[in-house]
Image (spheres, rainbow, N blue to C red):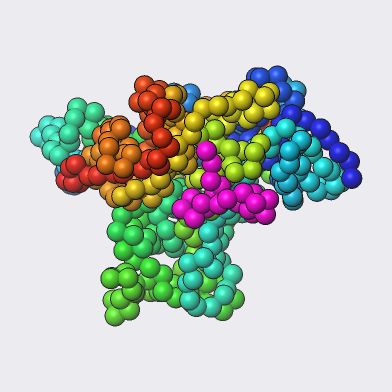
Amino acid sequence: MKKLNLWTLRSNVWRTMNDEKQITCICCPRGCRVTAGLTPEFHAAGEACQRGREYAREELVSPKRTVTAVVRTDSPSRRYAPVKTDQPLEIRYIDALLRELYRVRISLPCRLGSAILTNVHGTGVNVVVTRSLSDE
Amino acid sequence: MQVCEYDILVVGAGAAGMAVALACRRRNLRAAVVEREEEPGGILLQCIHNGFGLQRFGEELTGPEYAERYLREVEGTEIDVFCGTTAVRLTGGDAFRSVVTYSAKYGVREFRVGAVILAVGCRERNRGNIGIPGTRPAGIFTAGLAQRLTNIDGYIPGSRVVIVGSGDIGLIMARRMTWLGAKVLGVVEIMPTCSGLLRNVVQCLEDFDIPLYLSHVVTRIEGAGRVRAVEVAPWRNGQADSRNAFRLECDTLLLSVGLIPEHELARDAGVGISPDTRGPFVDANLMTNIPGVFACGNGLHVHDVVDYVSEESERCGRAAADFVTGITDTVKQIPLHAGANVRYVLPGTIAAGRSNLLSLRSMVECEAARCTLHRGEVELATKTFRHVRPAEMIRWNISAEMTDDMSREETQPLDITIQCVADDE
């Protein structure tokens, strides 16, 4: 719990120090370059539509990404299984998650969609297997 | 040699092969699929990142998840899939089409079938194709090979990486390598624009502050046993500007410099190969110049997203099923050529009196572009597309009404052009 507060504090400091940020909107192929900041309140410029504005806000407040990776299995023939987060995860937790996945070992057979980690860092995000594999 | 008889033989059990086989099976045809690898699924299985299926299923799937949807469906039908089996010779003929296959498990076989569908996929271009000078050390991989090593076999190809080419596989591998703990020093692209999708530039490069060197080339590879460094130079007026060259110390070079449809099986059978797509020439039914031989997927032309491969393959399967069941196609087909600013257009003909879905690739980048279908000076159809880029394929459906009167006209060839109506920014 303490660790979590530290993270929040750090990201707040970071925010006030580098307030305005250049963000490329990926909502459509137009790819607007949006300049956005959070102080004194949220402001954005350069976006062509409301979606770009919302995207920029999200990218500033809590940017998230879907993480995909592979994890080791206990099988000698099928050594790795692909996995993903079932929802986008806040970017600041990604490194810790990848480190954790590096240590995970799952046993086969596994079913597509079955969870191997739940509630990553209290975010409600789970890591699930993305391929059914049997130990043949 | 064992002879096997089927209505349809599909070569390749990747995204295209599975979709086309299912489309044939839905018409109650006996279909077999031969696959060179030990399991079906194709390249999707190593594409563990997400972003597949948005068009087709309305949700974001990873490659293995997309493949599994089709694999389950194939397993639930009477389609015979022969893995570890390589098609080595294709011959056309009046009574049947013949494909000879080699396999450690099944031996040498001849498939005698009503129609052959080539769903063979594509191959990566490599160092030899782009001619990078220098030594020949270990540590040079195509991006797709590196992807297979990391995602299927679990090996990490290197720790300091330079990527040549800004295609999507290269961008995806930049993120993958970073997530595996490697340092990606940059992506070097000869063209002035990135050839990958925008969201990949943002999520695979910008997220990690990986530099994208546009209009740059790798001019030398250094290293004896292993890659030690590469020299990168700006590309100006068709040559490398060596005075402004710089060195990047790295141990790994990944090449993402384009894909070529694997056309040898077709070519050796006498199928005409397009110099623009490097895949077979096909008509409005996706049939090649050899009757009963069809092609779809990345073995026909390289697609941006798998969703379009699946759609095209289903269309191909329906056309092949029509051919086999003797539904004779009396529709008149008019030749279609790529005109100004169009790198290629597929298929090579338009069928009169029915709707035609065209796939075309632009040579220019602009905010809005007008595509026009001409017969000589006459404009037959026109449509404006937004955000046109060479990296993104344009799909244009020419409705049946538009082609209706073509059946009455003489068969003067048509051509298709792209014209920018508003420049970028």
Q: Please name the residue shown 76% across and 43% down the image.
A: B99
Residue B332 in picture, x, y percent from top left = 49, 31
Left or right of B160 in this view: A110: right
Residue B277: x and y, percent? 48, 50
Total labels drawn: 0
> Which segment did they paint magenta?
B262-283
**Where is the C terminus of chain B found, in terms of image quarters?**
top left
Q: In this rendering, is residue B229 above or below B284?
A: below
- The residue sitting at 47% across, 72% down in the picture is B132
Q: Is residue B343 visible?
A: yes
Q: Main secondary structure of the magenta part?
A: loop
Query: Does residue B286 sit above or below B56 in this rendering?
Result: below
Q: Nearer the viewer, residue A74 or B5?
A: B5
Q: Residue at x 64, y 28 (%)?
A: B323
Q: Quadrant of residue B239?
A: bottom left
Q: Is residue A117 visible?
A: no
Q: Magenta span has B275? A: yes
